[in-house]
Image (tube, rainbow, N blue to C red):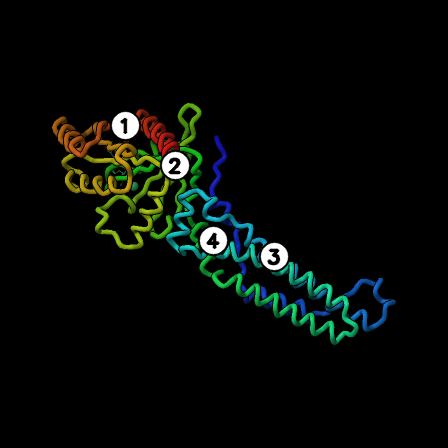
């Protein structure tokens, strides 16, 4: 089985400190007793005091530059898979990337500042002079840090959302399963998934997505069951749910749209077709696989009616399966994987 790589797992290590926390630590370093190396002892009291200020400032520099350096090395959205970049963009706009850019710049400024002050503190002739420069350095270094972390809270919000997002490896095939409640989405996902599916929160909703995975021959794929996201007419959805749809849309993944054609379906065929039409507004028709489920129980005329209605929307191919009895599902998954590779080529 291929090793799945996703930013949401990686993000568990991401962390952006607040300015307040760094300031506290810096001031603690400044006031705490500071040992100087024994070799300095013979240089006299004045020199020892000067060296104390130098060591304090060096530690404060390491603290600030080290922390901002970690922020500077966070992945920018333009190096991330689209799915995760979209989550960040929809949650905090540019604040995340801006925080990284500011951190990169600030590390350089801090380093330059420290080189300057290191020299003049060392060149001080009295401890009072050294103290004045040390205070000046700490003040300036903190103000650089404060500016760098101005939007740290917003950026952290985005990171929190990343951590709570499903682990999806965008370099491997992904298949989205959509359709109104009770059409058989979960049944299909469970039939074509090997291990127990993973359940993850989905950004911008209180809903959970179900992630299954499997292999056909040697091809690994991920299937996503999306209850509550692509299962209703879009005009019934609020702003936040629309964000969830936008995130889902950013995945290069074909959508299997399940339809229950039977007379005891939870929703009438018309309602199901209306949702399919909405899905057609977010995914190219080539990458939607309209699929009639429950063929084991549907009547001939129900199947025909559903098929004709779907074809009238412009679909070339309509799949007919029984998720429950595993009829036609592998052909469907194979086709979906093919489309998933094709989508990557063209998008
Ligand atoms: N007869 C029949 N029932 C099915 C089939 N697929 C799903 N069901 C049943 O339809 C109901 C809803 O299925 P579920 O997978 O939970 O639908 P979801 O809400 O779309 O996830 C369950 O009682 C399933 O057993 C099928 O192919 N044939
Ligand atoms: Mg379900």
SS at mark 4 in the image:
helix
Marks 3 & 1, CB-CB < 8 Å contact: no
Cβ atoms under marks 2 and 4 closer than 8 Å: no
**For marks 2 and 3 on the same chain, the one whose residue lies earlier in the sequence:** 3
x and y, in percent, of residue 325 in the image: 27, 27
Q: CA distance from mark 2 to mark 3?
A: 45 Å
- Quick check: is the Cβ at mark 1 less than 8 Å away from ligand 1? yes
Tell me if mark 4 has few (under 14), some (14-19) or many (20+) residues whose alpha carbon lies within 10 angstroms of its own. many
Mark carried by residue 325: 1
Front disc: 3 or 4: 3
The residue under label 3 is 108
Decide which of 188, 320 is in the foreground and name it.
Answer: 320
Q: Is mark 2 within 8 Å of ligand 2?
A: no
Q: Secondary structure at mark 2?
A: strand
Question: Which residue is tagged 2?
Answer: 212
Work out whether mark 1 precedes mark 2 in sequence or the reverse, and give the earlier one: 2
In which image quadrant can residue 32 be found? bottom right
C-alpha gap between disc 3 and disc 1 = 63 Å
- Nearest-to-viewer mark from 2 and 4: 4
To which quarter of the image does residue 103 belong? bottom right
| Mark 1 vs mark 2: in front | 2
Vertical placement of 193 versus 89: above or below?
Answer: above
Question: Is 98 rendered above or below residue 305?
Answer: below
- Packing grade of label 3 (10 A; few <14, some 14-19, many >=20) is few
Task: Determine which residue is flagged by label 4.
Answer: 97
Q: Is residue 212 left or right of residue 1?
A: left
């Amino acid at each position: 089985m291929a090793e799945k790589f996703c930013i949401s797992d990686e993000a568990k290590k991401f962390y952006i400190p607040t300015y307040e926390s760094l300031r506290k630590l810096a001031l603690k370093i400044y006031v705490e007793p500071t040992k100087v190396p024994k070799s300095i002892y013979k240089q006299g009291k004045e020199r020892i005091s000067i060296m104390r200020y130098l060591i304090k400032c060096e530690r404060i520099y390491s603290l600030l530059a080290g922390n901002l350096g970690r922020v500077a090395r966070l992945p920018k959205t333009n190096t991330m898979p689209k799915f995760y970049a979209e989550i960040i963009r929809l949650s905090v706009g540019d604040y995340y990337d801006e925080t990284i850019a500011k951190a990169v710049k600030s590390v350089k400024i801090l380093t330059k500042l420290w080189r300057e002050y290191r020299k003049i503190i060392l060149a001080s002739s009295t401890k009072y002079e050294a103290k004045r420069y040390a205070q000046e350095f700490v003040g300036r270094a903190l103000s650089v840090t404060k500016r760098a972390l101005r939007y740290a809270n917003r950026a952290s919000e985005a990171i929190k959302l990343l951590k709570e997002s499903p682990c999806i490896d965008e370099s491997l095939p992904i298949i989205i399963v959509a359709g109104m409640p009770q059409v058989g989405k979960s049944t299909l996902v469970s039939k074509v998934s090997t291990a127990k599916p993973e359940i993850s929160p989905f950004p911008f909703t209180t809903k959970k997505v179900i992630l299954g995975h499997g292999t056909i021959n040697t091809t690994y794929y991920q299937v996503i069951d999306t209850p509550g996201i692509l299962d209703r007419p879009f005009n019934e959805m609020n702003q936040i749910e629309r964000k969830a749809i936008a995130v889902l849309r950013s995945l290069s993944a074909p959508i299997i749209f399940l339809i229950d054609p039977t007379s005891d379906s939870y929703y009438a065929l018309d309602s199901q077709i209306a949702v399919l039409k909405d899905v057609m507004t977010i995914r190219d028709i080539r990458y939607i696989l309209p699929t009639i489920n429950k063929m084991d129980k549907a009547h001939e005329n129900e199947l025909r009616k559903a098929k004709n209605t779907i074809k009238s929307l412009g679909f070339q191919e309509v799949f007919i399966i029984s998720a429950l009895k595993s009829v036609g599902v592998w052909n469907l998954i194979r086709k979906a994987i093919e489309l998933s590779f094709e989508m990557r080529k063209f998008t």
